[in-house]
Image (cartoon, helix red, strand yellow):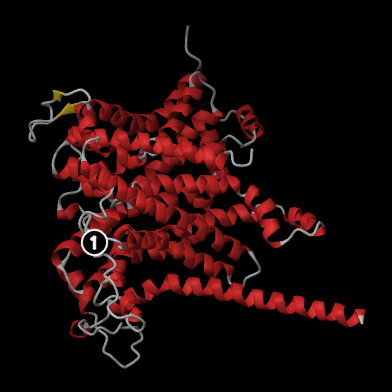
Amino acid sequence: MTETTSQDSIRARLNGDTVRNVLLHAFLYGLAVLMAVPYLYTLSRSFQPTELLRDPRPYWIPPLAGEPITLEHYQYLLNNTLVVEWTINTFIIAAGATLLIVVIDSMVAFSLTRLDWPGQGLVMGVILASFMVPYYMNIVPLYQIVSDLGLINSYWGVILPAVASPLGVFLLYQFFKDIPVEYEEAARLDGFTTFQVYTRIILPLAKPILSALALFMFVYNWNAFLWPLLVLSNETAYTLPIGLVNLYQGNIDTPGLHMAVAILGSLPLFIIYLIFQGQIVRAVQMQGATG
Amino acid sequence: MGLRKETIEGVLWSIPYLAVFTVFLIWPALKGLYMSLHTYPNKFDLTETEWVGLQNYVELFQDPVFYNAMEGTLLFVAISVPALVILGLIMALGVNRDVAGKRTLRAIYFSPYVLTVAVVTLVWGQVYSQSYGLINYYLGFFIDNPPGWLTSPDLVMAALAFMTVWWLVGFNFVIFLAARQSIPERLYEAARLDGATGWRAFKDITLPQMRNSVVFVVMVQFILQFQVFAQPYVMTQGGPKDTSDTLVYYLYRSAFSQQQFGYGAAMGYVLVAILIIIAIVNFKVIGDSND
């Protein structure tokens, strides 16, 4: 009697667990499919021939009813718009900002954590306090300053304000201050200069965090929207996000072109994401852990 | 009296970042205050300023457009932030269980985050389109005349917020996932021995242990979503009937379309003040809830 009840309850528990497990998988994968639908839709429609655009039925790749596929939208964009130039501009700006951020943020974080000088605490306090200044709130005076410096329509006008961001300094500061001091002391006894301590001890130890920060900043600056929109007014100087929106709002009105624009505009960064997914995610998680 | 070598080195290593930081972050913040107390009567010569004291601020608080933009912003925040936080938490707790293909799920969930807002608005413009849109095509099987998501005053903000959740929820998800994975398993084992599982374990272990990351994510999303700009700027231009106008979009129009730089700078300052108040309230509400 007791035996059967205990067996029954075990079976019931097993079934309950199995059902719950199936539901959990169904929910998580269902959500993943739903989140991916816009991608499939975008990719599909970017190959949709113009004569089918009036067809209200959604068009999916691979075509279910044997509809034709076209490359005309991509050809049009590559031949008649500046998409390629914009991609190059975006790459220069994102790479330039990233490189500068990694170099000078690591220098200042090194100085604030590994060197000892009066006023350090105050400097770090001001940098921390500047987190309270939301970037967008500064745009009017910042625009004036960048314009006074003659940096409108130049790469520097986009890069330098991005480099002023305290985020990287903050993350590196957190990491550098936990590096044991023994390494350095031993190196100093061996006659290492400050520069050698930085390049041979601190930077190698910080490689994982530096690459995560670099990738995150690259993505962030690649995607920046409002600031480049203000600074870049020449079509030839546009970054991808600004160029895309201009195409979208002005010159083209067919969904197929829109979608081809979206694909071309996101492809470079998406490839980078698929390769370096781990580091980009880690950079976000680091922000959460220190926040 | 010579300065110590280390002090000189420390300052030298800090100078590159501090120079950029001062010129492009601190100076604009101070200059913004000056600008907000002036008007710029000559659109072609911005060195010509006129002292007006607090007039910009007084006008702002009597400006119906400002209040309408505030309403739109708060509505957007009220829909997007809770959804971003709760959905991110559910996704993280789900993936943290025994599921197959964790890496795949993470890759898909996080992927929209690396898209630029320009691409997001392009894609969703098609998804939401009233006559050719993906959503309405499938809705058409269930209801007659599906609504125009971006053209109906009641739905437009919800539609923009929903799109934003798809775009950014991955950021919260990976932070919550890291926070959940760092909770020691023995806490749950101890709780299981006391018969605390499921909801009770969630309430007594998971939530308190994850509190810091929840506070961080709520704060970050509040500050970020409060500055919503690109979605209405690209997709709706604040319409229909100004129902999707937002504060940063209005700031952008004031300063950069209507050339009222003093007014725009004043608005920037008011927005910072509002954000600081929100931050303090947030800390009071979620920061001290358990003390």
Q: Residue at the spot x=49%, y=41% of the render?
A: B282
Most foreground residue, A45 or B284: B284
Q: Nearer the viewer, residue B11 or B86?
A: B86
Residue B208 placement (x, y as % from top left)? 64, 48
Rendering quarter of residue B290:
top right
Question: Label 1 crowding class (10 Å Cα cut-off): few <14, some 14-19, many 20+?
Answer: many
B170 or B83: nearer the viewer: B83
As drawn, is A289 to the left or to the right of B34? right
Tell me which chain the residue with mark 1 is part of. A
- Element marked by disc 1: helix
Residue A221, above or below B289: below
Q: Is residue A187 left or right of residue A170?
A: right
What residue is shown at x 64% (from left), y 31% (from top)?
A181
The residue depicted at 21 percent of the width and 39 percent of the height is B63
Left or right of residue B128: residue B6:
right
Q: Which residue corresponds to mark 1?
A: A244
Measured as percent of width and height from the top left, residue A173 is found at 52, 36
Work out which quarter of the rendered image holds the C terminus of chain B and state it: top right
Going by the numbered disc 1, the residue's amino acid type is: Leu
Picture quadrant where residue B23 is located: top left
Q: Residue furthest bottom?
A: A65
Q: Does residue A117 show up?
A: yes
Residue B206, horizontal then vertical, whole percent? 65, 53
- Which residue occupies the foreground of this view, B102 or B248? B248
Q: Is residue A106 visible?
A: no
State the image coordinates of residue B31 (x, y, percent, origin top left). Answer: 26, 28
